[in-house]
Image (tube, grey):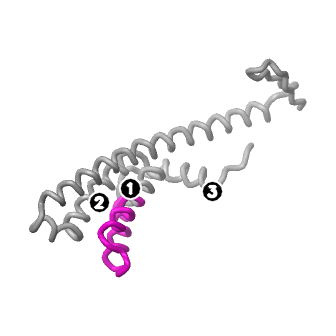
Amino acid sequence: MAKQSITQSAFLYLDTQPLLFHYALAMVTVTAALLATLYTPVIGERTAFMLFFFAIIQSTFWLGRNPGICAIVLSLIAINTFILFPIWASVPYDAFILNAGFSILSVVIIATTNLHRRSTTALWKSQKRYSEIVESARDAIITIDANHKLFWCSI
């Protein structure tokens, strides 16, 4: 049987955990982004958005689409409460534009990251199935590619 990579093992482990665990980890990633934003003096408002995007990407890639959506909501709450609150009072239109842009980009990030996650998982399952077929075969396996070239594997 083919050996799993660390990433595959992490996917399998996280997929077996309850949904509450997934949402808790999404909350932890957003909290880490918020703490890094608040307590790192070099990071300004623009970079804060990048850290929250990173939290959303990580939540979606490792935990799935719904925890990624949860990370978007938590990120919006954190950004508006801790970073954009003064802007809301003085220039609400700018804060609205920042929120709209953040939300649209976050949805695009979730869609692409979730697509990548699903295709990666499907590829791993296909590779596992292929290796199981090859390992369990008692005779030679002959395959033909799109150019009608013959490939064979003797067991």
Residue sitting at the far right: 154
Q: Quarter of the image for the C terminus: give it.
A: top right
Q: Position of residue 1 (x, y in %)?
A: 74, 43
Of 50 and 132, the residue lying toward us: 50
Q: Is residue 51 above or below residue 129?
A: below
Residue 73 position by quadrant: bottom left
N-terminal label among 3 and 2: 3
Identify which residue is drawn at 66% across, 53% down.
5
Q: Which residues are magenta?
A: 26-54
Disc 1 to disc 2, how far (Cα)?
A: 8 Å
Q: Is residue 15 above or below residue 54?
A: above
Q: Are marks 1 and 2 in contact (CB under 8 Å)?
A: yes
Q: Which residue is mark 1?
A: 56
Of 143 and 38, the residue lying toward us: 38
Q: Which mark, residue 36? A: none
N-terminal label among 1 and 2: 1
Q: Which mark, residue 75? A: 2
Identify which residue is drawn at 23% across, 69% down.
83
Circle 3 residues within 10 Å: few <14, some 14–19, many ≥20: few
Identify the element where label 2 is drawn.
helix
Q: Which residue is mark 3?
A: 6
